[in-house]
Image: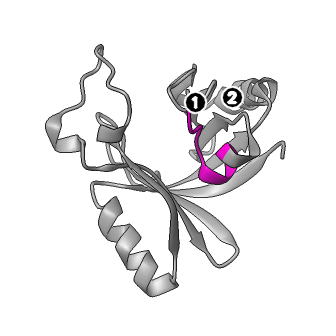
Amino acid sequence: MTVQLTAFLMMDGKAKQAIEFYKEALDASVLFSQTYGDAPENPESPLPANRRDLVAHAVLKIGMATVMVADRLPGRPHRSGNQVQICMTTDEKEKAIRYYEALKQEGQVEMPLQQTHFSPGVAIVADKFGIVFQIVTMTSEEAAIRGHQKDR
């Protein structure tokens, strides 16, 4: 696996309800789910108590497709057009850097390329057409299937 594109549905506090709905309506199965409270605490940016139970990342299997679902990051406003994003995963950090640099030209960086607790390189950028891409580096096939690194 060098590059994989996956639809990423960004919810405004209703990801758990959406997941339950898709399980019933589309026979979706939950491959992975994690709340914001499950992630390591960042002392520089403490998580408000009312965000801890919101979904930070979930992976659903619907037929042959994988769909990711999450509640919007704390402090990220909801705006028309960013509910569905493209999550681009690669196992090559150099490719993540190249895609990031290309997509940000005439676009808007929402989160600069950086290391996180779940990946050695993550960025969120809206390209010049307003399409939002989440660029994520995964270092194993298992992580790519889950949509995040298991241990960091």
Determine which quarter of the picture holds residue 152: top right
Q: Are marks 1 and 2 in contact (CB under 8 Å)?
A: yes
- Percent of width and height locating residue 46: 24, 23
- Point out the tag, 1 or 2, that comes first from the N-terminus: 2
- Percent of width and height locating residue 101: 71, 24
Tell whether 59 sits left or right of 11. Answer: right
64 vs 103, nearest the viewer: 64
Check disc 1 and report its element: helix, strand or loop: strand
Determine which quarter of the picture holds residue 75: top left
Q: Which residues are magenta?
A: 143-151
Is 26 contained in the magenta span?
no
Q: Is residue 127 visible?
A: no
Specify the amino acid type for callout 2.
Tyr
Q: Residues within 10 Å of mark 2 (few under 14, many from 20)?
A: many
Tell whether 53 sits left or right of 23. Answer: left
- Report the residue marked by disc 1: 123
Check disc 2 and report its element: helix, strand or loop: helix
- Report the residue marked by disc 2: 100
Residue under the point 37% across and 78% down = 21
